[in-house]
Amino acid sequence: MSSSNSVFAKAGSVWSEARVERLNALLLQGLSASQIAKALGGVSRNAVIGKSHRLGLAGGSPPSPPGRRATIPARAARPRKAPVPRCPRPPTPEPPSGGASAAAVRRRPASVVEAIGRVADLTALPRRACRWPIGDPKDAAFSWCGASAPLGPYCDDHRARAYRATPVRVASGRAPAGAGRCAA
């Protein structure tokens, strides 16, 4: 069979019959596509993979049958770190003489935030006024808090609700040594 009539060789193709036979032989030896590409020269790893798939040549692992997943070996369990002892909680304050329980004292908020805003129009808010929205913006009764806000966009009560304290981090992304531990 001449190369002009061959199914494997096209005008300008790098895949002659001899190269395809060598590709098959190298696949049967169990070489990787990268190793075969180096051995053949002038072709890439992906060209080797594509040619072997198009020709249905042996190589690599056969695909798993449809509907079944390939089994993945289980990972070895990592050793667990010893738990860090927690700091003892400070004693709860005694209930006031009014007869309220300690649980009721803890549930009471530090200060009550008004449910009705002081300013209905955002453009009417003074420069250092709280910009906490109150209610549904689509409702006619929607308003803004408007209380004094000397340290940012919110008053003290709304700032406490809007921001949470985060643990201190160092450049490595880990908490510094001793952070979060009890003071001795």
Image (spheres, rainbow, N blue to C red):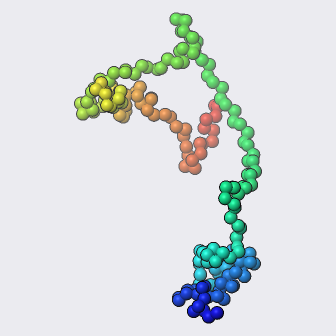
Which of the pair 59/46 is nearer the observer?
59
Quarter of the figure with residue 121 = top left
Q: Locate residue 80, reporting x and y percent.
A: 73, 43
Most extreme residue toward the bottom is 2
Q: Is residue 123 left or right of residue 101?
A: left
Q: Is residue 155 left or right of residue 40?
A: left
Determine the residue located farthest toward the left in the rendered image: 124
- Tally of numbered tags: 0
Outermost residue toward the top?
A: 98
- Percent across and percent down for residue 95 are 56, 11
Q: Is residue 130 visible?
A: no
The C terminus lies in which quarter of the figure? top right
Q: Is residue 115 above or below residue 30?
A: above
| Residue 103 rendering spot, x and y as whole percentages | 57, 15
Foreground residue among 86 and 140: 140
**Can the viewer see residue 29 in this picture?**
yes
Residue at (70% x, 57% y) in the render: 70
Instruction: Give the vertical position of 1 relative to 111 (above or below).
Output: below
Which sits in the foreground, 86 or 22?
22
| Residue found at x 67% / y 79% | 36
Q: Answer above or below: position of 112 versus 39.
A: above
**Which image quarter: residue 155?**
top left
Residue 7's spot in the image, x, y percent? 60, 85
Q: Residue at x 52, y 18 (%)?
A: 107
Residue at position x 43%, y 20% in the image: 111
For the N terminus, the image quarter is bottom right
